[in-house]
Amino acid sequence: MDLSQIITTIITSGIVSTLIGGVIVHFSNKKLEDYRFLQLQRQKIEIIAQLFAKWIKYSGKEEEFLNPKGLLDYYEELNKMSLELSLWISNKEIVDDIMGLLHGEDKATNVRALVGQFRKIILSNNDDTFDPKVIILWPSDEMRAKIFDQSKTSNE
């Protein structure tokens, strides 16, 4: 049997097509798994963003704006998000930074810096040059002062 007959026998037996098909399925499954992991990671980061947004909203003055039922609901949401992230974030330093911020510790990492850390995680790029200081948070400090000053006078 010469080489051309051997090649013809292999091709017609389906071995090559089975191998190629298996390789394609393997790479497709790997890509799908990577995509699912990235989606899950983004969902988890979204929970952190929601937690920060809710927490920032009242800046510790939620009692001036919410009735007792609203306060309970607000705290329940914050607790749920805080507990969730403490369970699935594997990086102890980041969890400590988040909890330090939420506890109001003097040397706590600020929200923007934490978002910058999460950005590096999502992008899998520790060399990301994005400056988190450019992240805009609303309302501005001046507007926030006006809002909270108005709430004091309307509650008195």
Image (cartoon, rainbow, N blue to C red):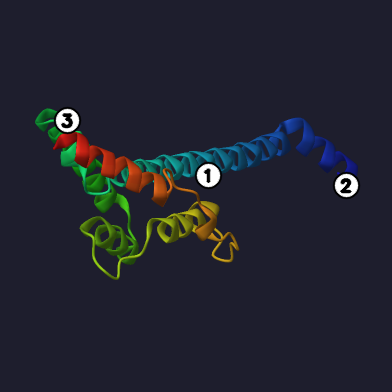
Residue at position x 34%, y 44% from top? 146
| Quadrant occupied by the N terminus | top right
Disc 1 crowd, CA 10 A, few/some/many (<14, 14-19, 20+): few
Disc 3 crowd, CA 10 A, few/some/many (<14, 14-19, 20+): few
Q: Which label lies toward us, 3 or 2?
A: 3
Badge 3 marks a residue whose secondary structure is helix
Q: Which label lies toward us, 1 or 3?
A: 3
Mark sitting on residue 153: none
Q: Which residue is mark 2?
A: 3
Q: Which residue is mark 1?
A: 34
> In this orientation, which residue lies closer to the viewer: 8 or 101?
101
Q: Which residue is mark 3?
A: 70
Q: Is residue 102 left or right of residue 71?
A: right
Q: Closer to the N terminus: mark 3 or mark 2?
A: 2
- Tell me the amino acid under the disc marked 3: Gly
Residue at position x 30%, y 50% from top? 88
Alpha-carbon span between mark 3 and mark 2: 81 Å
